[in-house]
Amino acid sequence: MGRYSHLSIEEREDIMVRWLGREGVSQIAREIGRDKSTVSREIARNGWVQRAGCRVRYRASTAQARAASRLLEAIGTSAYSCFPRPRQRDTNENSLGLLRECFPNDADLSAVSDEDVVATYADSNRRPRKRLARKCPW
């Protein structure tokens, strides 16, 4: 299968949908182009049993959060991770877009000082909001 890479949220969502559709591990693996041991391990590691005797349940967002948590634990740091609900998703994407105006995707963030981050944070909080009749939240 080539060089190993972590499962993406899209692949986890494909696993979730196909698992809920009662497809087998081998079929899911073929469909997403991964080894069946990867899919089997993913479901075993991030699935849960709701009632004894029932099939293992699997949710992509839970699996992604657990993977991020394991990664942070492995590198010895902590970070905030939000779980966007449908109403929050637009706000998160809008906020990220505003941050990307100051810090593009290809920007070297190691060159950004703490003062720059604080200034950008303050500027984003001072932006007028449509939802607040064009007033600032602060």
Image (cartoon, rainbow, N blue to C red):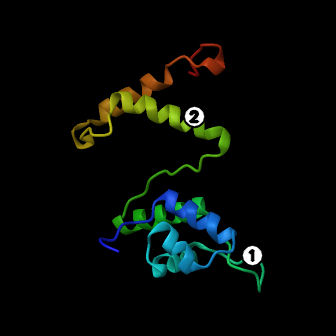
Q: Amino acid at mark 1?
A: Gln
Sequence-wise, the earlier of marks 2 and 1 is 1
The foreground one among 49 and 115 is 49
Task: Report the residue that reaches farthest toward the bottom.
Answer: 53
x then y, percent, for residue 45 = 54, 77
The picture places residue 100, in percent across and down from the top left corner, at 38, 33
Residue nearest the viewer, comparing 78 with 68: 68
Indicate the quadrant where residue 17 lies: bottom right
Mark drawn on residue 50:
1
Q: In terms of secondary structure, where does tag 1 sit? A: loop
**Is 34 left, or right, of 51 in this rendering?**
left
- Residue wearing tag 2: 91
Gap between marks 2 and 1 measured at Cα? 32 Å
Q: List x then y, in percent, for residue 36.
A: 48, 80
Q: Position of residue 58 (x, y in %)?
A: 64, 69
Quarter of the rendering occupied by the N terminus: bottom left
Q: Amino acid at mark 2?
A: Thr
What residue do we see at 67% from left, 38% from top?
87
> Which of 1/60 is in front?
1
